[in-house]
Image (tube, grey):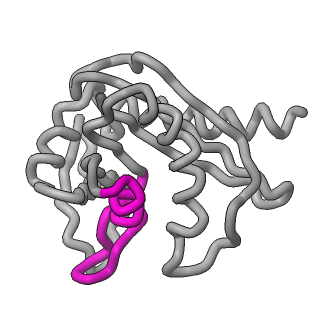
Amino acid sequence: MKLALDVHYDEAPGRSSAAGVLFGDWTDAAASETFAEVTSIASPYIPGEFFRRELPCLLSIIEPVRARVALETVIVDGYVDLGAGRPGLGRYLFEALDKAVRVIGVAKTHFAGSEGIAITRGQSATPLWITASSDAARAADAICTMHGPYRIPTLLKRVDQLARAGLSAAAAT
């Protein structure tokens, strides 16, 4: 199974919302399950140490899923590696998962110095930047095949919406 993840933050009350969509095939139009959780922000934003803030949120979604489902791939919003010798969020996640689950990073903006593979989808001329814990070319091909006619694949858009909705629901309480 594959699990796409995203996290959003509301700095004022110090909350974060992590979400995940679980799916079987790259071409799936809908998730087999969705997950969302609102928690306190684990760490303040520190430039160059984004993983300290985001990793606990991602693991809060992954661990219960992984306890009952065999995950083959996790997709994160961001980079696996920021460049040669510079681990990104995805690399820290790969290490936290004992290198047992492939991690793919899908970033919406280019990070200077990264070796991400630029792909375009739909009619967008703006690329997505793909990095991976292994075989980035294969990862880029997989993201290209994901369902949806637009730049952002359907299930990646869905996980973003779930994370944002988690914060909206928390704000209403």
Name the spot of residue 109 as percent of width and height, x first: 37, 62
Name the spot of residue 36 as percent of width and height, x first: 61, 33
Tell me where the magenta segment starts and ends, as one range.
77-98
Quarter containing the N terminus: top left
The vertical placement of 58 against 156, above or below, is below
Q: Is residue 154 visible?
A: yes
Q: Is residue 120 left or right of residue 94?
A: left
The vertical placement of 107 against 140, above or below, is below
Name the spot of residue 149 as percent of width and height, x first: 27, 27
Of residues 72 and 115, the one nearer the viewer is 72
Q: Quadrant of residue 45?
A: bottom right
Q: Quadrant of residue 42?
A: bottom right
The vertical placement of 146 against 95, above or below, is above
What count of labels does the image hold?
Answer: 0
Residue at 40% x, 50% y is 76
Of residues 172 and 70, the one nearer the viewer is 70
Name the spot of residue 93 as percent of width and height, x first: 40, 58
The answer to if 95 sits in the magenta stretch is yes
Of residues 14 and 29, the one nearer the viewer is 14
Residue at 56% x, 59% y is 54
Q: Is residue 154 left or right of residue 122?
A: right
Q: Is residue 108 visible?
A: no
Quarter containing the C terminus: top right
Q: Quadrant of residue 43?
A: bottom right
The answer to if 80 sits in the magenta stretch is yes
Of residues 19 and 130, the one nearer the viewer is 19
Q: Is residue 123 left or right of residue 51?
A: left
